[in-house]
Amino acid sequence: MEINQFDYTLPAELIAQYPLAGRADSRLLYFNSETRQCQQQLFSSLDTLLDPGDMVVVNDTKVLPARIQAVKPSGGKVEIMLERLLGETKALVQLRSNKTVKPGQMLLVADISATVVDRQDRFFIIEFPAGCDVVALFNRYGAMPLPPYVKRAAVSDDQQRYQTVFAEKTGAVAAPTAGLHFDQSLIKRIKAKGVDWQTITLHVGAGTFLPVQTDSLDDHTMHAERVTVSAELCDAIRATKAGGGKIVAIGTTVVRALETASRSGDIAPFDGETTLFIKPGFEFHTVDRLVTNFHLPKSTLLVLVSAFAGYDRVMTMYQYAITQRFRFFSYGDAMLLERAP
């Protein structure tokens, strides 16, 4: 398929710039298979659409305040945008500066001096001094890395709201946004219904926001992200499916993680980087249902949900959402999708 098939026109005012007062106050769009019509309700009632014996899988990654300001010894300003950590003292980053930054350049963050050691396409590798606590450095001096379509600077509330309530493992530079809709009350009701609650870890990179640059999907090179799927989760998924329950992925990151671990046909533990690009024609092995936010035109994430639920249905639901004035993208509303036959 061509990437132009995944384009749509979105009024700018539908791009959510701030979260709603309550996490679960957002709307949830789904397709009623009996009436063959789009329906909507509050996200807070998601538990009513789940069945006892199902399993909900969320991404427990934690967003690092990944946007940090540095200066060159000459005084020139450089913005460092973390993509991901590479061990204890190295990091893969994007750099923004008035002049091109080259390997060998020194960058000062407060009293810490980092060195640009290499360049990889649009990314740079920077190295901090031995013994430097890089995570602590970003936590102290960094700002939350709000997506490029949020046209404002990060504020103090974003420290909490651009983070899921179940975030545990630091390493992401973008939130797994489908998880932002959950509050503790909704999680409690889901568990009380007899729905299993499980986690994977996928550290979301800034590459998630990049549009596909090639005309043909077959020519696109997917960005890499770090994934951990445990043996205990694999056993739990097999037990759920054996009992007739459905695997409900909360977000495209969970789909990517579980299907990466299922490429052999049966899910197996996985700990490493994935470059899996899910596009129409992909054979799904594990995920049955998907809760996801609305995604950018011509994005790999829109391609993924179209592969999962069917291109025609997804595009119909997007047009319905625009007509009904749903809120789009990271701080916006959500949809519940069934896997297409």
Image (cartoon, rainbow, N blue to C red):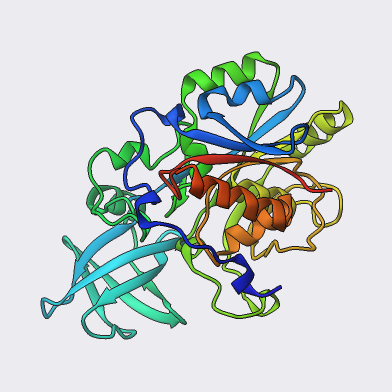
Q: On screen, 109 above or below 293?
A: below
Q: Tell me where residue 74 appears, x and y as whole percent.
A: 11, 80
Q: Tell me where residue 99 appears, x and y as whole percent.
A: 23, 85
Quadrant assignment for the N terminus = bottom right
Q: On screen, 103 above or below 160?
A: below
Q: Which of 134 and 253 is in front in this view?
A: 253
Q: State the residue lying farthest toward the left.
A: 75
Instruction: Judge from the rendering whether residue 171 lies leftward or rightward of residue 314; answer left or right.
Output: left
**Which residue is rendered at x = 59% and y = 58% of the image?**
301
Residue 260's quadrant in the figure? bottom right
Q: Tell me where residue 329 appears, x and y as whole percent.
A: 45, 50
Q: Can residue 167 be seen from the camera position used here?
A: no
Residue 37's quadrant in the figure? top right
Q: Tell me where residue 130 appears, x and y as whole percent.
A: 34, 63
Instruction: Judge from the rendering whether residue 281 lies leftward or rightward of residue 40; answer left or right.
Output: right
Q: Nearer the viewer, residue 185 or 214?
A: 214
**Which residue is rendered at x = 40% and y = 44% of the image?**
331
Instruction: Judge from the rendering whether residue 75 lies leftward or rightward of residue 230; answer left or right.
Output: left
